Structures are given as C-alpha cells and as structure tokens.
Image: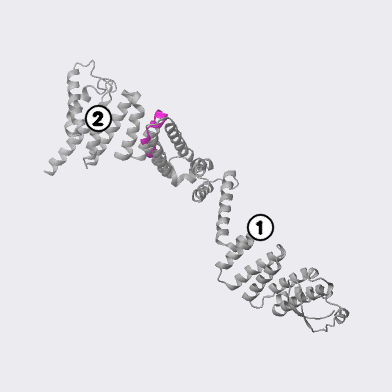
Amino acid sequence: MKMQSWLTGVTTLLVAVLWLLPPQATAQCDTWLNSPKKEEAENAHVLYRGFIKQKDYQSAYSYWKQAYTLAPSADGRRSSHFSDGIDIFRWKYQHTDDPQLKEAYADTIVMLYEQWVQCYPDETAYALGLEVYDLFYNLRRPYEEVYEIAKRAVDLAGNQTQYTVFVPYATVAVYLFSKDKLSKEQTRAIYEQLHAIGEHNIANNKDWAQYYEQAMAAMDAAYEPIAKTVFDCEYFKKKYLPMYQADPDNPDVYREVYKHLVQGGCDKNDPIVKEIHIKDSIRVMQEYIAKNPAFAANVLYQEGKYEEALAKYREAIEQENDPEKKAQYYFSMASIEFRKLKRYGAAREHARKAAALKDNWGQPYMLIGDMYAATSSSCGSEAWDHQIAVLAAIDKYAYAKAIDPSVAEEASSKIAKYRAFMPEKQEGFMRGIQEGTQVKVPCWIGETVKVRYK
C-alpha cells in the first residue's frame, strides 16, 4: 500500500509538472478567434469563469485548463486565462503540504506571469506588480528571485509601478545588502528610484496617492536598520526636515529631527543643524531658568534688569529651604539695591537678613560698611555728621573682620583708608564730646557709634 501511495504521488506530480510546462512559444499567445475549436474554447471559458466567480477553484480547474490549452490569450482582448490560472494555482499551492507540488505550482505561477507579460505587454506594470507581491508574500520565493522580478518590474513600469512592489523590493534589497550581495550604491539607488515613483504618484495619482504614501512609509521602515550606512546627510534632511518645518517650535519634534540629522552624518555646523541646536539650547536654558529662579535672577542682573532680578531672588527665597542659600540670595538682593538702585534702607535690611541666616559671615557687614562709607559725605548737614557716619562704616568693617577671617585683609585695608576721615579731636572738644561718648549718626544710617578721633 505504501509503494502504491508513493507511485500515485509521483504520478500526480509528474502529470502536474508535464502539464505545467509552457506551450511552445509560437502558441503561447494564441486566441480562439481563428481557431477551429473556437466554440469549445469559448464554452470552457464561460464555464470556468462561473466557478471562478464563486471562488470554486477546484471545479474551475479542468475547464480553465481546456480554455487555456485551446487559447492561452482568450480572444486577444482579455488576459483572464493568465490571471485566473494564477489564482487557481495559488489556491492549489496554499492547499497542499507536498513540497514538490508546492514548487511545481509556484513555477507554474511564475510561468503564467511571464506569458501574461509577453502576450499583453500593455499590462506589464500591473502583471509584474502582482507577481512581485505573489513571490514575496504568497509563494515565499528566494529573495534573489524576488529581487530580479522586482527590479524588472520597476525598470519596465517606471512611474506606473504598483505601490504593492515597494515593500517587497525594499525588504529584499536591504536583505541582500546585509549579505553583501548588493553594494551601498545599488541599495541606495533602489530606494531613490522607488521614492521618486512614490512622489510622482502622490502628486499625480489622486485615487491611489494614500496607498503610495503608506507604501513609502513602510519602505522607510524597511530601510531604517541600514539607513545610517547607506545614506548621506541629504537623505536625512529630505526625510526629517519636513517634520521640523511643519512644527518648528515643538521641542519634541526638533530634538528628534536634530538627533536623526547628526546620526545620519550631517555636520553640526550645517546651517539648519546649527539652527536647531541653538533653538534647543535656548529652550533648555529657558527651562532651566524657569525651574531655577536664582539662576534667572543672575541672568537678569547681567542684562541690567535689576527690578526683574530682585523679583526672581524673592521667588528663589520663597522656594528655598537651605538657610545658607537663602542668605546668599538676600545678600545678592542687598548688593543690587545698594550698588545699582541706591536703595540703602532696603539694602541694609536684606544684608542683615543674610547675616542672620549664616553664622560668622562677614560679607553682609562689609556691604553695610560700604553703604555707610559711600553715603557718609551726604549724611547730615555738616562735616561732623559726615565724620560720624565714617565711624559707623569703620565699625562694620571691624565687626566683619572679627567674625570672619576670610574678609580680614579687605576689612583692614578699608579701615586704614577711612581712618583719615574720622572726626578731628579739636572738633569734638569744641562740641564738648569726649572720646568714647556714644552719639547717633544722622540721616538714614541712624546707628549709635562710640566716638573716636584720628
């Protein structure tokens, strides 16, 4: 029984293969128009077509075989004997597990496609497009074979190439490139050829434009793993700059575009690449400034925007929990208010707050001393008042020096400088003020100092 089963299988395969051999070249495009068996061919055609419409390929086969044998090109105006034959043998291919039969059916499908193109050359683009799809998706033919048919299909069809060819051709090209069977130049040329065809159809083929767009997107995805090897900067510009131009102020967009351009080999000094980088740098800085008011305050100070800087320092103080950082912010406010805005009272208040938050810090007292020294000549109505104000300044320098060795040298230098402006002993005696007497400094300073003479 096993031998009989084996012989039956072999016989079936041989019959199939013998039947599937192409007719002689002189007959492969014959029609029934001048055939003595015209009526027989037409009847077979009508019968098998009825079954085809019902997708009953098993019943259609024998009638199709008769119609095809008598008139491969039917009446010369329809290519259905080829296309229907392909459908029938595709069905047979899908409904057998016998590898030899599968191969025979696949070979027959390829033969029918070849005859279709030869007998109906006006349908070349359509037929080859279907063949590429069949070879790639349905028949799973070797990629080298798919490549040859796809290349032929695209070269012959040009802008009439069907969108269904894009993914198979791109996929096998990428595969063959990865196996060193296609050069970088060949692989890139295939992409550029398909891209040009796609762009043409998107612009000129309204009914199918969306399908070409989808096919091109899928083609890009197929090429993505080798894109950085195969393409240069111009490819990545063409691919990604439209995204940037459509939404130039979206950081998610332009950061992604920048990444692809740089990774794709674009020079960072390229004008558009540099533009995006600068834009992103500004955005990063703006975000940092927004999250760091103290930094923002410093930037505003450098720009001469003192009121805005003070506002940012106030914001930083409200957000800050670290006493030492708060102290620094208060000190910065005091410095701006004194040196830039001449708001001495506010400056002194913030300097004192700074000193209270950080132990043994001499800088705030140095700053207050500078305020007193700077305004001493306008303090009060006479020279004595000015000199008393200098004593207030010297007191601050001395205190700063006493608590903070880091300012000792500067403090000593300033004390020595302003000692020359201390009150004259004779002036004090004329006023009846003994050395060591405590007096109040007039004007905004308002502090009490112990009188010393130079």
Residue most toward the left? Answer: 1
Disc 2 marks a residue whose amino acid type is: Asp
Q: Position of residue 443 (x, y in %)?
A: 75, 71
What residue lies at 24% left-to-right and 16% top-to-bottom? Answer: 33
For residue 73: magenta?
no
Q: Position of residue 25 (x, y in %)?
A: 29, 23
Q: Quadrant of the C terminus?
A: bottom right
Amino acid type of the residue that numbered disc 1 sits on in the rendered structure: Lys
- In the image, which disc is placed on residue 305? 1
Pinpoint residue 80: horizontal percent, then vertical percent. 26, 26
Left or right of 111 on screen, residue 202? right
> Which circle marks residue 167 in the picture?
none
- Secondary structure under the numbered disc 2 in the rendered image: helix
Above-or-below relation of 424 to 106: below
Q: Where's residue 275, x and y in %?
A: 58, 46
**Vertically, is 81 above or below 382?**
above
Q: Which span of residues is magenta-colored?
A: 153-167
Magenta segment, principal secondary structure?
helix
Numbered circle sitting on residue 84: 2
**What SS does tag 1 mark?**
loop
